[in-house]
């Protein structure tokens, strides 16, 4: 049991696991922000532009409700809001990865490549080598 706990502690304390946990928590919070953006800002503006249409109420009724049965419907408005959520999150992630890649390219371009030894340096090194060989 002690070995199991030690192995688990080693696993959990590695940087990748902690980075993953932080990423999941940040992603969850970001998802809530995007959902709020869509539900509280974008969809009301779309509703005004479409003449007061409430997307939450959009549905395709397959079987109408009766006294004994509940209505069976496809909730297309909720689906549309989730699709918009997805595209905003995907666009945000794409822009972030693109910016990081651009910064990395700039860093790679700034890194000077090692210069080839100058002929004068080579002759000095050869002289030093020949002196060392004589001793």
Image: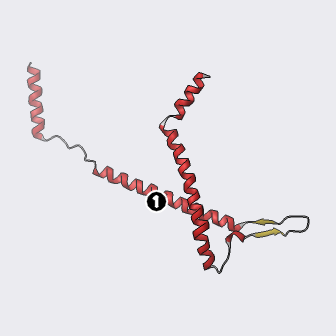
Q: Which residue is mark 1?
A: 95
Is residue 104 toward the left or the right of residue 54 in the image?
A: left
Residue for point 86% across, 68% down: 65
Across and down, in percent, residue 90 comes to: 54, 59
Colour option used: secondary structure
Q: Quadrant of residue 89?
A: bottom right
**Left or right: 72 as drawn, with respect to 1:** right
> Which of the 4 quarters of the picture holds residue 125?
top left
- Horizontal placement of 74 versus 34: left or right? right
Image point (67%, 71%), residue name:
55
Seen from the viewer's position, the closer of residues 109 and 30 is 30
Q: Position of residue 72 (x, y in %)?
A: 81, 65
Q: Helix or strand or loop: what does disc 1 sit on?
A: helix
**Farthest-out residue, top:** 135
Q: Nearer the viewer, residue 106 or 50?
A: 50
Tell me if residue 135 comes above or below residue 109 in the rendering: above
Where, quadrant-wise, is the C terminus in this rendering?
top left
Q: Residue at x 68, y 65 (%)?
A: 78
């Amino acid at each position: 049991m002690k070995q199991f706990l030690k192995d688990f502690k080693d696993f959990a304390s590695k940087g990748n696991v902690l980075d993953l946990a932080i990423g999941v928590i940040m992603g969850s919070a970001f998802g809530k922000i995007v959902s709020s953006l869509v539900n509280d800002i974008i969809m009301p503006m779309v509703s005004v532009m479409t003449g007061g249409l409430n997307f939450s109420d959009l549905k395709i009724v397959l079987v109408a409700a009766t006294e004994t049965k509940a209505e069976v419907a496809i909730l297309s408005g909720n689906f549309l809001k989730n699709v918009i959520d997805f595209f905003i999150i995907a666009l945000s992630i794409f822009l972030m990865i693109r910016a990081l890649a651009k910064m990395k390219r700039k860093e790679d371009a700034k890194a000077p490549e090692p210069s080839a030894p100058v002929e004068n340096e080579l002759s000095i090194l050869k002289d030093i080598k020949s002196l060392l060989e004589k001793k």
